[in-house]
Amino acid sequence: MDEVEAAAAFYAASQLEQLGLLQVCDRLVELHHRRGLPVGGAGDAAALLDAYWLGRAERMPDAARRELYARALGPGFEHLLGRLAAALAAHPEAASDDDVRWAADELRATIEAHVDASALEEVALLQAQLGDALALLAQPEILELYGSPEPWHLIDHLARLELGAVPDAVRHQALGASGTLVIAWLAAGDDAVTEEVVDAAEAWLTAAAMPPG
């Protein structure tokens, strides 16, 4: 995995953090450990909760993750991603290949300056942590327990109920999905600007313009 691919992973993870994904998962596991969740003792939900609890020492804590995002994405990252998204969105009508190339080169340069070897080593650990959390929050027994149709609804509900947070779910889901696709296009090094990439750039710009909260 190169630096730009890693940046895509970090950006997606940072948006999931804004939703409260890992904090919600930690709270669920804490409730289960204190026998506060009425899940079957021998079922899949209990097994996932127990495994997540037992593996807690091997995962990155909140402060370490946030420091990693700040260090790896670097100052000005969002601004440069916005410039690239704007150039890609305008590409079919007004922007030239030079506009896109300049914005892409600027974003790539800042990523390569900030994603170092130690950050690259953390990608697999972070992705595994997020995958375990999503698997837990997608477990049917846990979804049913809270009356949630899917994990994103559950995350939003529990962030409000257990953490006192009001996550901006629509905005951060849109930023994460579209921004990751734009950065993945940058990582691929493909000069062709496809309709999918243009759509992602437009979606990122729309989400970025949404008022927070």
Image (cartoon, grey):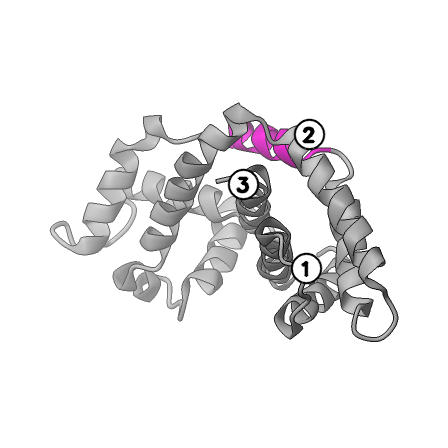
Q: Magenta segment, which residues?
A: 62-74
Circle 1 packing at 10 Å, graded few (<14), some (14-19), many (20+), is: few
- x, y percentage for residue 162? 48, 47
Looking at the image, which is closer to me, 111 or 82? 111
184 sits left or right of 100 in the view: left
Going by the numbered disc 2, the residue's amino acid type is: Ala
Going by the numbered disc 1, the residue's amino acid type is: Asp
Is the residue 47 above or below the residue 99 in the image?
A: above
How far apart marks 3 and 1 lie (CA) works out to 20 Å
Q: Which residue is mark 1?
A: 191
Q: Is residue 209 visible?
A: no
Looking at the image, which is closer to me, 89 or 104? 104
- x, y percentage for residue 142? 31, 59
Secondary structure under the numbered disc 1 in the rendered image: loop
Q: Which residue is mark 2?
A: 113
Residue at 64% over, 56% down? 179
Secondary structure under the numbered disc 2 in the rendered image: helix
**Which comes sooner in the sequence, label 1 or label 2?**
2
36 sits left or right of 86 in the view: left
Is the residue 103 above or below the residue 122 in the image?
A: below
**Which comes sooner in the sequence, label 2 or label 3?**
3
How far apart marks 2 and 3 lie (CA) works out to 13 Å
